[in-house]
Image (cartoon, helix red, strand yellow):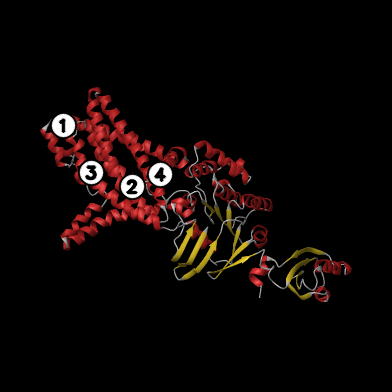
Amino acid sequence: MIHCHNLSHSYSSKVALNKVNFDLATGEPIGLVGPNGAGKTTLLSILCGFIRPTSGSVSLFGHKPGASALNGKVSALPQDARLDPSFTIGEQLNFYARLQGLSSQQAQHETIRVLDAVALKDSIKEKPDTLSHGMAKRVAIAQALIGSPELILLDEPTAGLDPVNTRNIRTIIADLSPSTTFIISSHDLAELGRLCQQILLLENGNMSSMQLNTSEQDSPTRFITLQMEACPATEVMTQLKQLTGVLLVSNPQKNEFIIEYNPTIESKIDIKILTCLMDNRWQYRQFSQGKTLEEKLFFEG
Amino acid sequence: MTSGFLNATLLICQFELKRLFTTRKGLLYLITFAIVWYFILLYPIRFSAGLFEQNQNSTQGSNFFEFIGFGALLNWQIPEFGVYWRFALVMFPLLCITIASDQSCSDRERGTLRFLSLRVSRDSLFFGRFAGVMAIQTLLILVTVLTTLILAIYRDINLLPIALNSASAITLNLVLVLRPFTAMMAALSASVKSARQATVWAILIWSFLAGIISGLSYYLPALAILKILIPGYQMADLSQLAEWQTLELAYIPLLQSLVFLSIGRWIMSRQSL
């Protein structure tokens, strides 16, 4: 679906992307993460055809970004893009739908459908300036859903949204996948962990890829992440280390413990850990298999 | 050229017309234009036409108009259209610089062009906006020409056939005259960040390009031909012509539009959105 070869982009003297290579296939949502200034928005802008790469090649469905063949096939939520303040939201989404080849009547239905999907059907006659930041973001997401795009690129889709609407957007993405492939740039790692099977990490203009479901299967040791209520950290670590099969216990953040264990020595380690917690009357908040995405991406040694 | 390209260009053009007739900014522009035009029609055109009509057949009157540089107006069969022609040649290019200054710049700065470019080619966007602004100006020209025609036939209904002929010649010519100005604004709008910047650049180009080319052609006379690239280069000669003779110089705005549209299209295709 997407093929990037030695893709580089620089702004004056600052390198945003440095010879990035990757191939992506259609399917489950793909997460794009990286620190601020890592080049995520630059990469998405190149894929959308908004900017031209300094060097290297990129193709989407066999076409260069911005090619007419991709019109309506690739959709996006660009960062900080705003609608025209002179027209109502309905008029503009209707116009976008017409440009995608829909008839006047189909465009009207499509406008109502996508605004309903982001719970903004009642704002159809409002102008963009009257909307809050979160509502404007939802309208921008709605325009990305017009028609039946095969690839949707979302740059920070839930930044600034309230929890109810964040969940709503997550549901939309989950419902449309895998017939529509999403590439989601976000700093919300918990959200990406819920939605994505593959994560692309951009750091200092360089890219690496990670498959979330396979990374621990091949490893001889596995991990459990334990989030506790207030507890004596040193004592918890001492008690957990004494369990058979536990290799290492670390305490990366307050009340959070990562337990590395060998499943061939003790296959029912989860039961053992929970029993240990119960015996010591320690309350846990969350008990999950594997490391958090944050640990995997940014703190793994 | 595919039907998809033409459909998209037409839709964008229609949306620009909608911007003029349905948005507050567009309606405000129309009302202002109507008021200004009403006063131009009522006083300068009506009174000047009366004056020309009285002196058209007198040698003394003709000499006076020749002396003040308006002798060419006497070549028009209907004086109202002669005066209109002189007014229009100044008024519409000036209006064009304001009305055509924001063909893409504010949408690009706001990010709206990103939404659009995901659905249509940049060529469709560029030519659609250009066509939209040209359609708006054509409508304004038609309205002003029609009101002038009504003024003329109100004076003498027998002038209708001649008036229709003059009106057609003027409309066609003005549309041609405005093409290079609109194309220049399209190219500038694709390059700068705001409508104001586009207007300032247009005035600078207009003012200094002629001076620079004249200066260069002093040393290298062959370069004088570059003057043909300055929008409005033919206006002084054009104002001396009447009726269908005015089409003699139509090749100049057509050539200029071609050059400016090619430059604008090239800028638009490479511009970051």
Give the position of the C terminus of chain A as an image quadrant.
bottom right
Residue at disc 1, secondary structure: loop
Type of residue at label 1? Gln
* Numbered circle sitting on residue B9: 4
Nearer to us of marks 3 and 2 is 3
Q: Going 47% across and 44% down the picture, which residue do you hit? A: A99
Q: CA distance from mark 4 to mark 1?
A: 47 Å
Of pointers 4 and 3, the one earlier in the residue sequence: 4
Type of residue at label 4? Thr
| Chain under disc 2 | B
Nearer to us of marks 4 and 3 is 4
Type of residue at label 3? Ala
| Chain under disc 4 | B
User: Residue B61: which quarter of the image?
Assistant: top left
Q: Position of residue B256 (x, y in %)?
A: 27, 50
Q: Are marks 4 and 2 on the same chain?
A: yes
Q: Position of residue A92 (x, y in %)?
A: 51, 43
Q: Position of residue B64 (x, y in %)?
A: 14, 38
Residue position marked by numbered label 3 in the rendering: B250
Looking at the rendered structure, the number of numbered marks drawn on it comes to 4
Residue position marked by numbered label 2 in the rendering: B182
Q: Are marks 3 and 2 on the same chain?
A: yes
Task: Tell me whether circle 4 and circle 3 mark residues in contact (CB < 8 Å).
Answer: no
Q: CA distance from mark 4 to mark 3?
A: 25 Å
| Chain under disc 3 | B
Of pointers 1 and 3, the one earlier in the residue sequence: 1
Residue position marked by numbered label 1 in the rendering: B56
- Left or right placement of residue A186 versus residue B27 in this view: right
Instruction: State the residue in front, B38 or A80.
Output: A80
